[in-house]
Amino acid sequence: MFNLEFKKIKKIFSFKTSDRLCFDCSCGWISLLLFFVILNVSLVVFSIFLHIKISKGEAFVVEGGGGEELNFSQINKSDLDKIIYDFSLKKDYFDNLKQKKSINVVDPSL
């Protein structure tokens, strides 16, 4: 199992340059472990902060009134009619498939 020695951890945070200049595998693993521990703690703190902001209703606030008049003059009527027609064709095709009990599908494994 991974065994951390307190002296090696203390050596990383020491202010003596001679101790920090030696670099072995355990020092690298300990520094990598500390980096990810600090990263995870910071993510948990940010998540808690964001949760509190959302709970209070202070996050994702939209400025302005919601009762403004909607402007539909920019919508192209012919394109909208094409889209509605396509959806009606898909609905009719789906209804026809639902009414058929046996659908002739070729088995791809044969």
Image (cartoon, grey):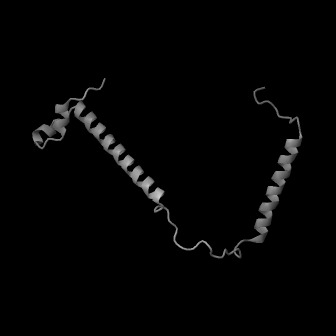
Residue 2 x %, y %: 29, 26
- Residue furthest toward the front? 56
**39 displayed left or right of 78:** left
Q: Quadrant of residue 49?
A: bottom left
Is residue 86 shown above or below 100?
Answer: below
**48 displayed left or right of 24:** right
Residue 27 x %, y %: 22, 34
Q: Residue at x 77, y 71 (%)?
A: 77
Q: Residue at x 48, y 61 (%)?
A: 57
Q: Quadrant of residue 33?
A: top left
Residue 23 x %, y %: 19, 35
Please tell me which residue lies in front, 16 or 3: 3
Residue 84 x %, y %: 79, 61
- Image quadrant where one finds the C terminus: top right
Q: Residue at x 31, y 23 (%)?
A: 1
Is residue 58 shown above or below 77?
Answer: above
**80 displayed left or right of 21:** right
Q: Residue at x 28, y 34 (%)?
A: 29
- Residue furthest toward the top? 1
Please tell me which residue lies in front, 41 or 74: 41
Please give the count of numbered marks on the rendered protein.
0
Please tell me which residue lies in front, 57 or 27: 57
